[in-house]
Every structure is written in structure tokens, then in C-alpha cells.
Amino acid sequence: MGIHLQLRELGQRVYGCAPQLAYRVMALLLPFPCLGCGTLLEPGPTHLGLCIGCRHLLSRPRVGACRLCMRPLYGDPNLAATAPERHCGACRSNPPPYERMVAAFDYAPPMTAVIHGLKALGLDFLGSDLASEIATSYHLGLLRGCDVVTPIPLAWSRQWRRRYNQAAAIALPLAEMANLPMRALLTRRSRPKQARLSRRHRLGNLDGAFSPTPELAKGSKVVLVDDVVTTGSTLQAAARSLILGGAASVVCVVAARTPRWSERS
Ligand SMILES: [Zn+2]
Ligand SMILES: [Zn+2]
């Protein structure tokens, strides 16, 4: 990843502009190293920052997954595909507060490198590429009938350090593609980082972490966007806060979903 940071810093020095814009300018002028394998790409626009070979390695959630958590529905695939609700046993016994979840990709290499580029290298243009992948995968049909798009917010301290919210970098272009407004409907208090906690502690850690803002209109149907879902505890806490704040329904849209070990080949 070092070369990506060097490109960004070089662009900033040469052009004196914001890191994301500097990187974009440099990527158009110089050979761009693929985020997945480091192969130099031709100068010009790249899709997801990946070479064609790495793009072929991207994996997507299987068709026929649970509509609430995106886990595969094991058993008879025909039954899974035609069952009226297509919800797994875990979601039926403990329903999440949102009505549907969709993910464009599995969070596995090389998608992990794309998300790292979006999150840690400041390559916010990857958000547009991920939004167009979500729009293509689901034909935006899912978002019709929704009223507003909102990203999972970062706590202010984290946003200040990173300068932008990676979920908003996906949510804004997605809202534009769906002709919906994007609004900040949630605020977030600082908590220990979710990734460092066990599943049990993750759930408790998020109690009261999110609060709705005055921008949340009563009865609105909200599209809630995040970059990666792992256990789903962040999306559940945020969706619960939206519903308690008066939202009629929440649809969760994520760029990538972390497969469980049992799903990995
Ligand atoms: Zn590659
Ligand atoms: Zn489920």
C-alpha cells in the first residue's frame, strides 16, 4: 500500500490540493498500481482500483441468501428461493429492526484491499465505484419507494482524524443514482472500536451509541448505508435508533459482507 500513499502525497505536493483529489489526478496521469496485486495499470479511470484479473476474483453473496442477514440458506435451494420470506432461523427467532439487507460483495480479498483504500488511504472515489456496483447488482429497484439515504455516521473524533466518512462516500453517489436525498439522520457517540471486541461485547458496546437527528422525518422509509457488515450489530443499533426516532422502515445497503468461516472455501 506504500506506493498509494506516496502517489497521494506526491499529488498533494505537486498540485497543493486535497488528498483525494490529488490522488485522483495522479492516478489519471501515472500508471496506477492495482489495489489487489500491485500490477501497474494504464493511466486513466480505473474501476474499484483493481486490474481485470483482480476484478474477476471478487466474490458476491450467493443467490438465495437470507434477506435479513445475507447468510446462505442451507437445505433445499428451491425451497430457499421460493419460501415467501426467505429469512433464516436466527433472523426468524430474533428479527432485526430493519426489513432487508443487501450487500454487493463478500468482504474477502481483493475487496478487503478496496475497502482499505476507501477507509485508510483516503481514496474516496472508490465510494462511487462501490455505489455503482450496488446499483447494478440490485438495479436500484430496492431503493424505489424509499424516501431518504443516510450513512452510518462516524463518531466526531474519528471523522476528524479521517476527514471524511467512508459510508457517506458510498451513500452520496448511491443517493444521486436513485434520485433520493442524502441526509445525516444519525449522530454517534464515541465507543471502543467494534472490530476489537467480541460479538457479545459488540452488542452491548452499541447500546445508546446512535441518536436520531431532527432531520429524520416521521414515517420516512430510510436507506441505511455502510461499507462493511460483520456481525450486523452496528446496523441493528443504528436501524433501531431510526425506528425509535419515527422512521417507518429501514433497508440496509452495504458494499461488502464478511462471510462466516463455515461459508469460506
Ligand atoms: Zn490486480
Ligand atoms: Zn438471517
Image (cartoon, grey):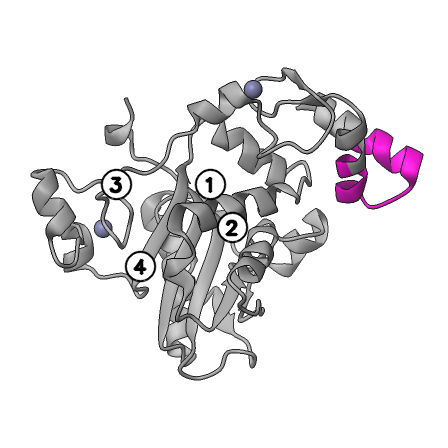
The amino acid type found where label 3 is placed reads: Val
Tag of residue 28: none
Measured as percent of width and height from the top left, residue 128 is found at 60, 47
Residues packed near mark 1 inside 10 Å, few (<14), some (14 to 19) or many (20 plus) = few
Q: Which residue is labeled 2 in the image?
A: 192
User: What predominant SS class does the magenta segment belong to?
Assistant: helix
Cβ–Cβ under 8 Å for marks 1 and 3: no
Query: x and y percent of residue 164 in the render?
Result: 68, 52
The disc, 3 or 2, on the residue closer to the chain's N-terminal end is 3
Q: Nearer the viewer, mark 2 or mark 4?
A: 4
Q: Measuring 17% from the left and 50% from the top, which residue is drawn there?
A: 88
Among numbered discs 1 and 3, the one appearing first in the sequence: 3
Q: Earlier in the sequence, mark 2 or mark 4?
A: 4
Is residue 231 placed above or below 251 in the rendered structure? above
Report the span colored magenta.
8-24
* Residue 76 coordinates in the image, percent (x, y): 7, 39
Residue holding disc 4: 100
Q: Amino acid at mark 1?
A: Arg
Q: Earlier in the sequence, mark 3 or mark 4?
A: 3
Q: Earlier in the sequence, mark 1 or mark 4?
A: 4
Residue under label 1: 196
Assess whether mark 1 and mark 2 are in contact (beta carbons under 8 angstroms). Answer: yes
Q: Magenta stretch containing residue 23, yes or no?
A: yes
Separation of residues labelled 1 and 4 (CA atoms): 27 Å
Q: Is mark 1 within 8 Å of ligand 2?
A: no
Residue at left 85%, top 33%?
Answer: 11
Residue 237 located within the stretch drawn in magenta: no
